[in-house]
Image: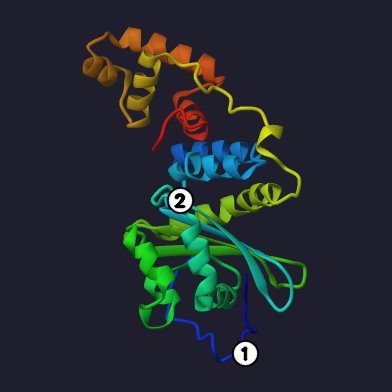
Amino acid sequence: MICFGGEGDGATRSPEFPPWDGNPEVLDALQVELLMANLDASLRVHTRAQFFTWTQGLLQGLIRHEVLVCALRNGEPLSLRVDSFSTNVPDSAIFSELFLRDSFVAANLIKAWKERRCRPVICEAGDVSPNCGGAFARELQRVGASQVVAHGMHDVHGQVGSFFTFACRSGTLGPRQAYLVELALPFLYSAWIRTQIDGATEGDRPAPAGAGILTARELEILRWIYLGKSNYEVGAILKISPLTVKNHVQKILRKLKVVNRTQAVGKALETRILIP
């Protein structure tokens, strides 16, 4: 747990974050559909394992990130309960530990967020610590995450209630990604809060729908669909007719209880049938 002073505390000077104009690009049809699939998936998250599966699976298609750090306000003076999620290291807890250890990280990001009237902050990972020398920033850079987008939610008094930091690869962040973070954050917050409820256990929830019901051929076809291949292209790769591919796709849709290819990919990522 980390405690730090208010905005007037001279120990937490805001870094020089690059400007962000806040004007998102228009979302395409695929992004809109993927957004809706993620919002639906978030409603079925009740445990930490399910949260990990969702954020490191289906959510990656919408907000591509290497590390996600979730922070919840935990009293006065401001203190935070922190958890982190990543598939890039054996134990993702290292990121939450370093986030807590380097008090400048949370202080600078939250201060910059407030200065932007509670809009997402986009910056280089090294800018969140003095002289770019913080252990948290170095660990992010070690896994190739050199940029961050951070956003939070405030309480009725205007104080930060929760804060989420996505660490991403260089060149992947911009107004559109910041806008998607704004759209997804209320559902991200609600899902994570449910995982914090005392008494929740892994055995209280049903196994993910769709797990283990696809044949090897259907799974192979689904992987090519995930990579953006058409029925004709999949048929050419697997040396089967496009009609045969279409029949397999229809079976996949029925088994996963979805209505189109995009939803099938989203469901497969959510349930870890497919691994990005």
* Crowding near the residue tagged with mark 2, few <14, some 14–19, many ≥20 C-alpha atoms within 10 Å: many
Instruction: Give the residue at x 32% y 18%.
Output: 231
Residue 127 in percent (x, y) is at 40, 76
Q: Which mark is residue 245?
A: none
| Element under disc 1 | loop
Q: Look at discs 1 and 2 and give the one toward the viewer.
A: 2
Instruction: Give the residue at x 56% y 40%.
Output: 38
Please name the residue that numbered disc 1 is placed on. Answer: 8
Please name the residue that numbered disc 2 is placed on. Answer: 86
Give the vertical position of 198 relative to 146 (above or below).
above
Q: Earlier in the sequence, mark 1 or mark 2?
A: 1
Residue furthest out toward the bottom: 10
Residue 234 placement: quadrant: top left
Gap in Å between the C-alphas at discs 1 and 2?
A: 34 Å
Q: Amino acid at mark 2?
A: Ser
Residue 239 in percent (x, y) is at 22, 11
Instruction: Give the residue at x 40% y 69%.
Output: 137
Q: Quadrant of the N terminus?
A: bottom right
Q: Amino acid at mark 1?
A: Gly
| Element under disc 2 | loop
Residue 241 in percent (x, y) is at 27, 8
Q: How many marks?
A: 2
* Crowding near the residue tagged with mark 1, few <14, some 14–19, many ≥20 C-alpha atoms within 10 Å: few
Observer-nearest residue: 274 or 123? 274
